[in-house]
Amino acid sequence: MRNNKVYKMLITISAAAMVLSLAACGGSGSAGSSKAAASSAPAASSAAASSAPASSAAVASTPATSAAASSTSGQGASLDLDLKTLYEQVAKTHTKNYQDLFKPTEDQAFATAEIFGIDRTGNTAKMYVFAATGEYVSLKGKAYNVSGGQGEAIFNIEYTNGGANLKSIDWSDSGAGHDKWVKNNFPKAYYDKSVAYHPSEDNGKSKLMKALDAEAERIMGVPVEQNNLLNIDTDSRTYEIVQTKESGTGADYKFETITIDKGKL
C-alpha cells in the first residue's frame, strides 16, 4: 500500500523566457563517476549560504507549457538550449504516483532548475544545476503538491539535428555524502556558484517549489493549496485533506494533523 503524506512544499517564483543562451564558464575538473538514469527521486538538500544566485530558473511541465529563463554568461562558446523542452523532459522523469486515480489533466508533473553552468563536448553536454521536480493532483477545485524533491544534479544532454535531448540525470547524494558528491562532481566554478546559491527565501520557502506552484496553477487552472495537505491511499482509493497544527517548543513541541475532509476517489 502506498499512503504518501504530503509534506508542505514551500515556495518562490522565477521570471520567464523560452530559450536560454548559456556560456560555458571556466572552471576546473569535470563531472565525476556518479551515474544514474533519469531519476524521479531527487535528493532533498540545501546549498550553503551567501551571495546571489548564479542564474535564473525556468519552469516546464508535462504536457507542454511555456517556460522562462534568463542567461548565465562566462567564458567559452555560447550554447543555445530550449529550456521549455528540456524541463518537460526532466518533468517526465518524475514518477507520478497517482496517475491511475486521476485524469491526465488532474495529475501532472513539473520541473525547473537554477543553472550554474554547462560544458559541451561535441554533441554532448553536462548542465550543472540545483533542480526541483514535483507531482500535483487536482481535487475539489484545488491543486495539491503530492510528491517532489530538490537538490543538485547534472543533466546529461545530447545534441541532435532536431535540438537537444535529456539523456539522463545524475542526482546528488543525500545525507552525509551530499557535500562530497557535489564537490567531486561539479567543476570548481560551478561548485562555487552552488555553494553561494540560496535555495530558500528568508522565510524558509523554497524558491524553485514556488515556481512549480505557479506553473501548476497556470496549467491546471486551479490554485495550489498552501495550508492543508492531501493524503491518498492508493489501495482503498480514498483521500484525506488534513490541517497541520504546531505548538510548543523544544521538548514540548507537538505536530498534529486534523482531518477536515475525506472521501472516495
Image: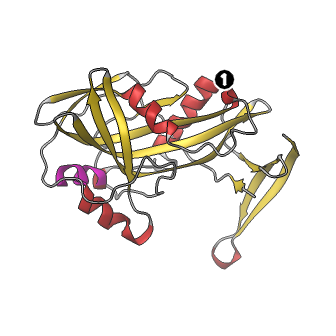
Specify whether residue 6 is painted magenta. Answer: no
Secondary structure, mark 1, is loop
Q: Is residue 95 above or below residue 28?
A: above
Q: State whether the magenta stretch is mostly helix, strand or loop.
A: helix
Instruction: Tell me if 265 is positioned left or right of 201 in this view.
Output: right
Residue 230 lies left or right of residue 116; in this view the side is right
Query: In the figure, 106 relative to 6: above or below?
Result: above
Whole-percent x, y for residue 52 in the image: 30, 44
Left or right for 223, reference 109: right
Q: How many marks?
A: 1
Question: Left or right of 185: which side holds 231?
Answer: right
Residue nearest the viewer, comparing 118 with 121: 121
Give the residue at the far right of this rendering. 263
Q: Name the residue under label 1.
A: 221
In the picture, the quarter occupied by the N terminus is bottom right
Q: Which amino acid does label 1 sit on?
A: Gly
Q: In this view, does 249 lie above or below 170?
A: below
User: In percent of the image, x 38 and y 47: which residue is there?
Assistant: 169
Q: Residue at 30% x, 37% y: name it.
A: 157
Residue at the image position 32 percent from the left and 63 percent from the top:
181
Q: Position of residue 155 (x, y in %)?
A: 34, 43
For the rendered model, the colour scheme is secondary structure
Instruction: Name the residue rendered at 70%, 55% in the picture.
Output: 5
Q: Position of residue 135 (x, y in %)?
A: 60, 41
Magenta highlight on residue 189: yes
- Nearer to the camera, 2 or 145: 2
Mark 1 surroundings: few (<14), some (14-19) or many (≥20) residues within 10 A: some
Q: Which quarter of the figure has residue 129?
A: top left
**Magenta residues, as a range?**
186-194
Q: In the image, residue 25 lies at what x, y percent?
A: 16, 41
Q: Which of 243 and 108 is in front in this view?
A: 108
